[in-house]
Image (cartoon, rainbow, N blue to C red):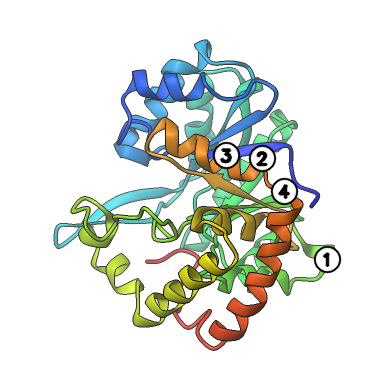
Amino acid sequence: MNRSPLSWIGGLPFGRDLCINDTYEILTSLTPSSTYVIDVADIYSAGNSLKILLELLPDLPSNILLSLKLGLEVVFYDGQFSVRPRYWKESELFNTFSSYLEKFPASRLHSFQLHTIPEDISSIDNAISCCFAMQRIFPDIFLGISNIEAYEYLQIQRISNNLFSFIQIHANILEQRLLSDFSSIESVSQPLFYVANRIQARGIINTQSKVFEDLSSRFNTSLRVKNSFTSHKQMMLDILKNLANKYDLSLLEIAYLYILSHPLPISPIHGGRSLAQLHESLSVSQTYSKVQLLRLQSLLAEYELQTRQFANIYPMLAFER
């Protein structure tokens, strides 16, 4: 597998599950021979994730970089947490982006991502114009888009003259629709690389998972997320667990190796609410063997036969409004 030498880490737990001292301990424990990109948005943990990372960044090793996402705002509907695309005035996105770069050097920024595509034409035009300015002033950073459909990506690339070099999508072995949609894009129109979030489907694809018992998990705090785990998903998970036992692979290994072995040039975002969890997922991605990959291919052949009719039945949107 020809994969990026970068390892991506989700920034959401920093400031939410982990205090600044725990965050520092985790990030300074990473292997110095690798490069790590922390995927972080201004809204993560009510802004605490980015605040902590910016405070720590001067004292973190130079192999730790940031990927900054802007473009969503938090809203509450009937007391339920949700997000929606942000509206952008002229130059507003670039000014917001620049205000963060006043707090850390551009050399520590790997990439910028639109957190999603705005809903109105004016905001789209303003965002693209600002991204052109970013590219002109900071030519070494990658520009990407998160939470986007394949057809939207093609439209945006057409009107922006292929401005964006990578895409972040929601993808895992239980939810494959976006992987399938983006795989159908002609090679000449493919982005340079992909990044995948929710590799473990919000913690479900894990032998030790307790997401349904945890009252603070999104399966208990969000009706939309709870309803997304349909009876078909439960059936697919049960099949996956049985095949994991048959082929002597953990659910964590299956989750990450499924993404790493995909034909698209895609890297998983590693999550973890603790040092042990993060190191476990990084270890799977960095030290897998040919034997594990052969077992995975056999497992996938059986899994796809048994779940083909259900794999994409949940009408998951790139950005679930």
Mark sitting earlier along the chain (2/1): 1
Mark sitting earlier along the chain (1/3): 1
Cα distance between the residues tagged 2 and 1: 27 Å
In the image, residue 185 sits, relative to residue 256, either above or below, namely: below
Residue 104, image x, y percentages: 53, 18
Q: Are marks 1 and 3 in contact (CB under 8 Å)?
A: no
The amino acid pointed to by label 1 is: Ser
- Pointer 2: what residue? 286
Q: Quadrant of the C terminus?
A: bottom left
Q: Nearer the viewer, mark 4 or mark 3?
A: 4
Question: Is 256 left, or right, of 69 in this rendering?
Answer: right
- Tell me the SS state at disc 2: helix
Cα distance between the residues tagged 1 and 3: 29 Å
The amino acid pointed to by label 4 is: Ser
Q: Nearer the viewer, mark 2 or mark 1?
A: 2
Cα distance between the residues tagged 4 and 3: 14 Å
In the image, residue 232 sits, relative to residue 201, either above or below, namely: below
Label 2 environment density (alpha carbons within 10 Å; few <14, some 14–19, many ≥20) = few
Residue extending farthest left: 78
- Pointer 1: what residue? 187
Q: Are marks 3 and 2 in contact (CB under 8 Å)?
A: yes
Residue 275, image x, y percentages: 43, 30
The amino acid pointed to by label 3 is: Leu
Residue extending farthest top: 59
Residue 169 visible in the picture: no
Viewer-side residue, 141 vs 61:
61
Viewer-side residue, 33 vs 74:
33
Q: Which mark is residue 282?
A: 3
- Tell me the SS state at disc 4: loop
- Pointer 4: what residue? 289
Cα distance between the residues tagged 3 and 2: 6 Å
